[in-house]
Amino acid sequence: MIRVNLLPYMEEKKRESARRQTSILILTTTVVMVSLVSGHLYLMNESWSLDQRISQVRTDIKGLEAKIGEVDKFKADKVALETKLGIIEKLKINKLGPVRLMDELSNAVPSNVWLNSVKVKSGKLELGGVGLDNTTIANFMTFLERRDPFGVVELQVSENLKVRDIVLKSFRMSCPINGIGS
């Protein structure tokens, strides 16, 4: 009978198996290393990209802060200009106020009333004068109250005054002035 020595075949098979396992190990190690290196490079690239974005955003923030400073300056300038315009408007009203007041007052005085004094203090008009009688003075007060810039008229004093044998009424009255600066 022929004897076949299978031992070298088995050894060859074991060596082939060891070579195959070594190749798989090397291939797996290589794939893992390549994956780790590529993952590391990818993460480094992402980190660098994010650093660039952060740097760009910080630059943008500095630029926007400068613009915010300009906007705040413009707001302050706007408030200052609005204040100045308000003052100018008030000056215009105050400039025309006395003229308007005297015009309204001259139109309101009837022919039987004569004014001796006209004073404006703290937004209040004080009148002093002489009238023919109490009815004339009362009508003058009512007429004044109906006119635009004058408020409620308050009679302070009404006294008899004799001038060349004619009995007249001396009066003092006051009323607030609406809408006219003083």
Image: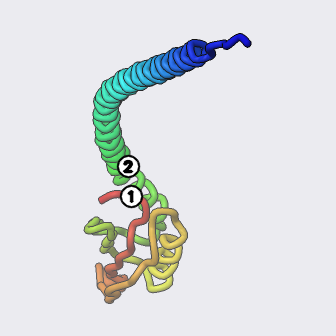
- Which of the image's four quarters has the N terminus? top right
Q: Residue at x 31, y 72 (%)?
A: 126
Residue 103: x and y in percent read 43, 54
Which residue is drawn at the image coordinates 66% and 12% (left, top)?
4
Name which of mark 1 and mark 2 comes first in the sequence: 2
Where does label 2 land, which residue?
93
Amino acid at pointer 2: Ile
Residue in front for this viewpoint, 146 or 16: 16
Quadrant that contains the C terminus:
bottom left
The answer to whether residue 139 is left or right of residue 63 is right
Residue toward you, 26 or 45: 26
- How far apart are the two marked residues, 1 and 2, measured between alpha carbons? 7 Å
The structure residue drawn at horizontal position 48% and vertical position 74%, both measured from the top left corner, is 140
Give the x, y percent position of residue 164. 29, 79
- Decide: is 21 above or below 68: above
Q: Position of residue 117 (x, y in %)?
A: 27, 68
Tag 1–tag 2 contact (CB < 8 Å)? yes
Residue 92: which quarter of the image? Answer: top left
Task: Check residue 168 in the rendering and tell me which mark sits there, or answer none.
Answer: none
Q: Is residue 56 visible?
A: no
Q: Is residue 46 left or right of residue 21?
A: left
Identity, as a three-letter code, of the amino acid under mark 1: Ile
Residue beneath label 1, please?
180
Tell me what residue is drawn at x 31 percent, y 45 percent.
83
* Badge 1 element: loop
Answer above or below: position of 29 versus 139.
above
Res 177 quadrant in image = bottom left
| Viewer-proximal residue among 166 and 128 | 128
Which secondary structure lies at badge 2? helix
